[in-house]
Amino acid sequence: MPGNTIGQAFTLTSWGESHGAAIGGVLDGVPPGISLDINKVQKALDRRKPGGQHGLTSARQESDQIHILSGLYDGKTLGTPLSFLIYNKDQRSGDYDAFKNIYRPGHADYSYTMKYGHVDHRGGGRASARETATRVAAGEIARQILQLSFPTLQITAAVIQMGTQKLNASWSGHSYRENPLFCPEEETIQSWIAYLNDIKSQGRSVGALIEVYVKNLPAGLGEPVYDKLDADLAKALMSINAVKGVEIGDGFGCIAAENGYDELSAGTPSKHLTNKAGGIVGGISTGQDIICRVALKPTSSTLQSRKTLTKDEIPVDVSITGRHDPCVGIRAVPIVEGMVSLIIMDHFLRWQGQCGTTFRK
């Protein structure tokens, strides 16, 4: 089946292309009678949308105004499919005419053509990061529902590395003053801005490393074998545009470790002395912080000349102009939070369906 839906008990199906009339999504499995704050959903979308005044993201001007079409009445969910759309208003499809017959390096032009026989070259079509706005909206709705059962739940992500620039100290998942780079270290922000402006002025791009923490989630969420909580998180995070790697807990650092386990003790609130596993063991949450890291590649659209082929397989050099992010990792922070929220919500409903309404102590 086409891969436009994620989740089992709580599902999101997204639709639309970058330069189509609109993008949108359908959420199914939404519990009835839930009061949703649409203003908070809009604020989540505003965190991701392009056109920031700082000039560090795409200059595309989109309001990303959400329109709820179904599943909500008098401010409360009906339990029926909740559908929404976001209109595209600042398409400049003509900017892509020069690339209609060229495979842009790093983009999905070639692979989509090999699968479907043709591709929507306007801004990447379905492969565009424009689609991720639907994930952010759906993720915020999931977060609001989750916080009814878990009032202290926190799902917070931050950029902990941008290109060669790293934080001075490790981040522990604490909240921070929001800034254009989603950098959790106040003293580092200005040097990162200068670094990224230099990258942009050279017509280059850089990748980023995002870390996300889930705090105050109880033990017991997740399914054995194929639907492990960490497996579903990894799939959801890998589905985000430009993501090429996901770590959970110690991740690849466990290879050189002398042991990869967390000892238990009755004297600690979480019953564990360390958290090398990132809050998930056997595919099920332990009640500790869930910690994931997400690696994003540099933006593929840059001014630098690169070798490629036309659709007639003629070698050419191409330099891509247009409105692009010098680092897609910046705007990916709310997307990461949204995808984690969707997966946690899905597993929460699955847990309720099998285990009841009271978590084990």
Image (cartoon, grey):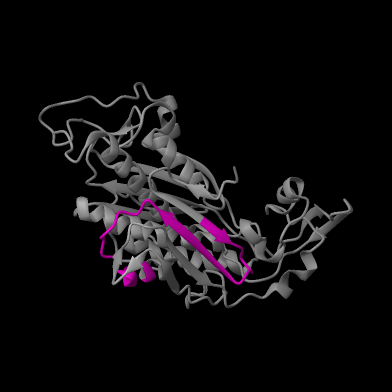
Residue 227 in picture, x, y percent from top left:
41, 33
Residue at 55 percent of width and 63 percent of height? 130
Q: Quadrant of residue 286?
A: top left
Q: Quadrant of residue 18?
A: bottom right
Horizontal arrangement in the rendering, residue 15 relative to residue 255 (left or right): right
Residue 247 in picture, x, y percent from top left:
44, 39
Relative vertical location of residue 48 with respect to residue 308 in this rendering, above or below:
below
Relative vertical location of residue 92 with respect to residue 154 in this rendering, above or below:
below
Q: Nearest the camera: 37 or 201?
A: 37
Residue at 28 percent of width and 56 percent of height? 145
Q: Residue furthest top?
A: 258
Horizontal arrangement in the rendering, residue 20 relative to residue 307 (left or right): left
Relative vertical location of residue 84 with respect to residue 355 in this rendering, above or below:
below
Q: Nearest the camera: 290 or 159?
A: 290
Residue 26 within the magenta-colored segment of the rendering? yes
Residue 283 within the magenta-colored segment of the rendering? no
Q: Quadrant of the C terminus?
A: top left
Whether residue 166 is visible, yes or no, is no
Q: How many marks?
A: 0
Q: Residue furthest left?
A: 267
Whether residue 258 is visible, yes or no, is yes
Q: Nearest the camera: 46 or 189?
A: 46
Magenta-colored span? 14-42
Residue 178 in picture, x, y percent from top left:
34, 66
Residue at 42 percent of width and 56 percent of height? 27
Q: Quadrant of the N terminus?
A: top right
Residue 38 in picture, x, y percent from top left:
33, 70
